[in-house]
Image (cartoon, rainbow, N blue to C red):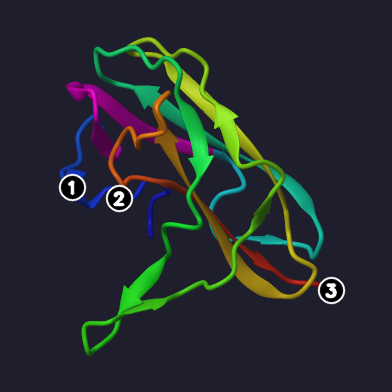
Amino acid sequence: FTNTLACPQAAAMRHEGLPIADGGAGPQDVLIFVADVTVPDHTVILPGERFTKTWALQNAGSVPWTGRRLVRADDELVISLRNAHGQLQPLLDSHLDSLGRSVAVPTTLPGQLVELSVEFAAPLENCSVASIWRLEDAQGRPCFGARCFLQAVVTVIGG
């Protein structure tokens, strides 16, 4: 992926070229991925290193975000590639350990930016690992569809 926010249904780029996703609360519920604030994807990490991944998002719609959570979705989603036979093959079959499974999203009014952070611990062996996260509403439903997620991908290399 070239961007942390992967939303095939929102392939058209708007808002100064940043990826967007329309949400479950209707067309007025809009998320824009702004930046990887810390630890860009494909960062090299030392074995056992603890680090904080922070994403910056903007509520670009007219619906306030209240009661939402950033939730780990590794059990449901896999980063994969379609092979020549049309079958999906996982690119990364191991997950990056997070120190929690969810993070509360503070109330975010239309137009506001929010930074969401997750603490991770790298495995002890050399490998590439990922963790996949999505925003859910207070009822546990994905806010921006099952195909819209944030990811942390790192390569662990020991010296």
* Name of the residue lying farthest toward the front: 139
Residue 159's disc number: 3
Relative image position of residue 116 (x, y in whole percent): 55, 30
| Residue type at numbered disc 3 | Gly
Q: Residue at position x 23%, y 23% from top?
A: 25
Residue 10 sits in which quadrant? top left
Residue 157 sits in which quadrant? bottom right
**Image quarter (top left, top right, bottom left or bottom right) of the N terminus:** bottom left
Tell me the residue that label 1 is attached to. 9
Relative image position of residue 89 (x, y in whole percent): 38, 79
Give the extent of the magenta segment: 17-36
Relative image position of residue 46 (x, y in whole percent): 78, 63
Q: Residue at position x 43%, y 23% from top?
A: 138
Tell me the residue that label 2 is attached to. 147
**Is residue 122 left or right of 16 when viewed as pictured?**
right
| Residue type at numbered disc 1 | Gln
| Residue type at numbered disc 2 | Arg
